[in-house]
Image (spheres, rainbow, N blue to C red):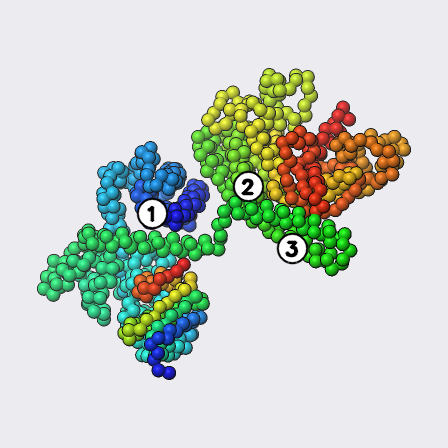
Amino acid sequence: MSNDLEAAKQGFLSEAGDLLSAMEDALLHLENSPDDMEAINAVFRAAHTIKGTSGVFGFDDVVSFTHVAESLLDKIRDSEITINKEIIEVLLRSGDHMSALVNEVIANDNEVCTALLETSGALILQLNVFMQLTPTEIIINESTENRIETLEGDEQIASNNNWHISLRFGVDVLKQGMDPISFVKYLQQIGRIISLSVLPNKIPSLDNIDPEACYLGFEISFQSECNKEEIEAVFEFVQEDCDIRIVPPHSAINRYIELIQALPEEDELLGELLIKSQVLTRNELQNALSDQQNKSKTGADKSIGEILVDQGVVAQEVVGAAVEKQQQVRTKKNVESRIVRVNSNKLDELINMVGELVIASASASLLANKGNNPELEEASGLVDDLVDSIRNNALSLRMVPIGETFHRFQRVVRDVSGQLRKEISLVITGAETELDKMVVEKIGDPLMHLVRNSLDHGLETPEQRIVAGKDAQGKIHLNAYHDSGSIVIEISDDGKGLNKVLLLEKAIAKGIVDAEQVLSDDDINNLIFHPGFSTVESVSNISGRGVGMDVVKRNILALRGSIDLESTEGEGTVVRIRLPLTLAIIDGFQVGIRDDSYVVPLDMVIECVEYADFNKANDNDKSESNYFNLRGEVLPLVKLKDHFNYSLVENEQNARANIVVVHYAGRKAGLVVDQLMGEFQTVIKPLGKLFSKIRGIGGSTILGSGEVALILDVQQLIQDASEQELKHVS
Amino acid sequence: MSTDNTKRAVLKPENMTIYEAMDLQALFSATLADFKQIEVNLSQVVEIDSAGLQLMVALKNDALEQKKKVVFTAHSLEVIELFELFNMTQFFGDPVVL
């Protein structure tokens, strides 16, 4: 198989994915507002495009299944069937099935396993029930020929309903400021143009043409709910100059014959066009024309539907449909060309290179500053600025809004609440918040777990909620926002909250905590992140196996993030995940302790103050004090020198000390360092496993001088500071 | 200038609406008189209406009659849209490149 085809298939796969998720969104939307035509159209478009593209690739199993769904959707669109919950349910499952089918045919080279075909059959049965079809008309396990025949059968019915419009525009139409284009476009709005042919033969040669006159004629086959007056009204402004004939659907053949003879073009030509518009068959036309000549009336009471059974027309129809589909694919491509799909490996490579560039330019600017050459310094300053913007741009390439991840949960919430017989609505805010693509991919599973937990354990059944005096419908809220260099994702529900007594009992029973231990409310709540902890007596198939929350926590920690939980019994639970915005390069603030450099993420730094108490404190023997009076506020201090066990050196008190005030997750602390060295673009390099036990170090980076600096893990340091504070108090 | 059979003309019209129709007609017929092969590059066409389309048809028809060759190339999005609306792609028979 050629590579082009393979690439096209992969393209189809991703397109189908997008379409199906759009279809799912639209269906979920329809559940609440079933009258939204736009959403119905979106669902129809998705099914139609998938069917069309599958047809081009020859994926017959996808086509035959999607066709049934599409037919139903068409009926819904034409308001023959009203959409309801059951239909949406089946359509949702059909969407899932289409996705499975498409994946299957692409992975297995157009082979579909029997299990999927059985599902197709079952779903088709259900879909047909809505269309009130008898089971004999169902297309399963039939030979390909049969399939096509049934397909053709449907097209016949559609053709039956077509209006036929013959337009001959007046010569002065263009001069009057009207253009046939707009009429055709307007027709598209009030119905569907099944086929359209332009009659160009009245256009004279270049020498004789009046460039401002209109010579165009049209034969249009048109499907619409409008009546004749409404269609005529379209041409109201040009009626006087133009020859407009409208033949209603279900007309007998001789109406068309009359039309053919009434119009100025040759009979044969118009006949050809009518065949092209699939109104008449060639035989029927010939018969009719000769009948007409014989003044026989045999053709008169035959309806078009009967004529169309002819094989030739049907074959043309199939071709016509294929062309239409190709055009749709093309239109879509035009829209997509504004977006370039890039292999993520290439992006990663780019980011890596930018990282190296940052380090190299830092080294260059260091040398430039030493060189005492003002021009060189200026040039290197400019390079630094440019590198800075390249870095920002490169990183933003990887940023994607979290909305897509959030929207996936609409379906989960809907399905699970159905299974659990709970009424739950999902509220999404902050969907436009951006974060690194890699983080988005890795956050999906933990989020899913947390949402399911909320659905299963957090929210009560409607009866329980009413007893508790709440709205019968429970609410899950997904929220995301940026906060000091991290993104915060909140999953909150207004359910029953955590039962602290039960939690503590369980923890004691499992030996996780001692019975005498005094724990704060937060500590108790966060016990559920402990491995092997589950409070639910019965394990449901949604959650509660007790393997979840610790895995969630581990995954989040692996992304250098943190997770915590707030819960008020009876009122609900909020789980808050904090993640770094990017995993590659950050703005850092460089500080020094003795000869070593450390980097604090700049986003977490609030201010720097001089540690004025330092010398005084020594005199008064208060050097053990771990607090600082920051404008009347108590600021816990982390003395990095003590924290990292630097040995004492004589005469140290002469050195000045500074405090870097940092904040994380709403808590503040001061880091006591020797020197402040300023801002610095930091390319994060991971630390080896060997160093994973060192508390307070999050990674390393390379300075312009080639030296290594350690990146401080502010979250951990703040935690340590508050723990010490607690110890001090107790 | 007499008809030169070997020469090939490339036209690159901008908008093709009724406002430009007079000029276009003059341009098309002058070019057709002088050249045997004409390429009309449509990449710059941002606006096109029925008048422009008619001139394209006339040029094509005249060329066929005189056994000359006219190709339309690099159809802009607007031209493609109009062709699709009117089902004219086949009439011109030029390859439409996306």
Secondary element at tag 2: helix
Residue A652 appears in the picture as rendered: yes
**Label drawn at residue A101:** none
**Label drawn at residue A386:** 3
Q: Is residue A374 above or below residue B4?
A: above
For label 2, the residue is A438
* Residue A562: quarter of image: top right
Alpha-carbon distance for marks 3 and 1? Answer: 47 Å
Alpha-carbon distance for marks 2 and 1? Answer: 33 Å
For label 1, the residue is A57
Left or right of A65 on screen, residue A483 = right
Name which residue type carries label 2. Answer: Met
The chain that hosts pointer 3 is A
Residue A25, position as x, y percentages in the image: 45, 43
Secondary element at tag 1: helix
- Tags 2 and 1 on a common chain: yes
Residue at coordinates 46% horizontally, 29% vertically from top-left?
A: A420
Crowd class of label 3 (few under 14; some 14 to 19; many from 20; radius 10 Å): few
Residue A363, position as x, y percentages in the image: 70, 49
The chain that hosts pointer 1 is A
Point out the tag, 3 or 1, that comes first from the N-terminus. Answer: 1
Name which residue type carries label 1. Answer: Phe
